[in-house]
Amino acid sequence: MINFNYETDFELDNEPAYEQWLSAVILSENKKEGEINYIFCYDEYLHKINLEYLNHDTLTDIISFDYSVGNELNGDIFVSVERVRDNAVDFKTVFEEELRRVLAHGILHYSGYKDKSDADAALMRSKEDEKIAMFHVEH
């Protein structure tokens, strides 16, 4: 089950479309969907988590806590909407695409992908692009 929680005034426009897409992303990695909670928040909220749990005194767009068991993905994914907005400008893309990149990024981490080395980061970016392309909204 994919859950969306808000510690900010931001809200997804079409939660069912995002839920369906994220479920498809999980299946595309041959994983089972457990319980995944997305928590949308402000920089300050995520900065406190970064300090308290990871001992990092930096701003970030996403922090994921992985509670997966075997092939079943479970976890909490915190997303700073402010960071995503700023990154969209920095990377010359639209907010919605950068948001999808971050949402997929958390699932990909749970699926075993890393991003610390250049080679791992390149593979992660490629997988993010593949997953973003899977997002479709019927008009």
Image (cartoon, helix red, strand yellow):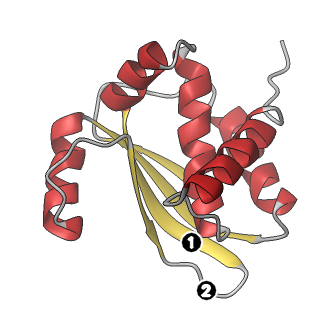
Depth check: give the residue in front, 28 or 137.
Answer: 28
| Structural crowding at the residue carrying mark 1, measured as other residues with C-alpha within 10 Å and reported as few (<14), some (14–19) or many (≥20) | many
Residue at disc 1, secondary structure: strand
Give the label on residue 74, or none: 1
- Identify the residue at horizontal 85%, vertical 19% (top origin): 138
Specify whether 32 is left or right of 46. right
Give the label on residue 69, or none: 2
The C terminus, quarter of image: top right
Depth check: give the residue in front, 36 or 92.
Answer: 92
Query: In the rendered image, which quarter is residue 60 located in?
Result: top left
Which amino acid type corresponds to the residue marked 2 in the rendered image? Val
Sequence order check: which comes first, mark 1 or mark 2?
Answer: 2
Query: In the rendered image, which quarter is residue 108 located in?
Result: bottom right
- Identify the residue at horizontal 80%, vertical 23% (top origin): 137
Q: Position of residue 23 (x, y in %)?
A: 75, 53
The alpha-carbon separation of the residues under discs 1 and 2 comes to 7 Å
Specify whether 134 is left or right of 68. right
Q: Position of residue 112 (x, y in %)?
A: 65, 71
Which amino acid type corresponds to the residue marked 1 in the rendered image? Asn
- How many discs mark residues in the rendered view? 2
CB atoms of marks 1 and 2 within 8 Å:
yes
The N terminus, quarter of image: bottom right
Depth check: give the residue in front, 27 or 128.
Answer: 128
- Identify the residue at horizontal 57%, vertical 53% (top origin): 118
**Up-down relation of residue 103 to residue 86 (above or below):** below
**Residue 89 showing in the rendered view:** yes
**Up-down relation of residue 139 to residue 16 (above or below):** above
| Structural crowding at the residue carrying mark 2, measured as other residues with C-alpha within 10 Å and reported as few (<14), some (14–19) or many (≥20) | few
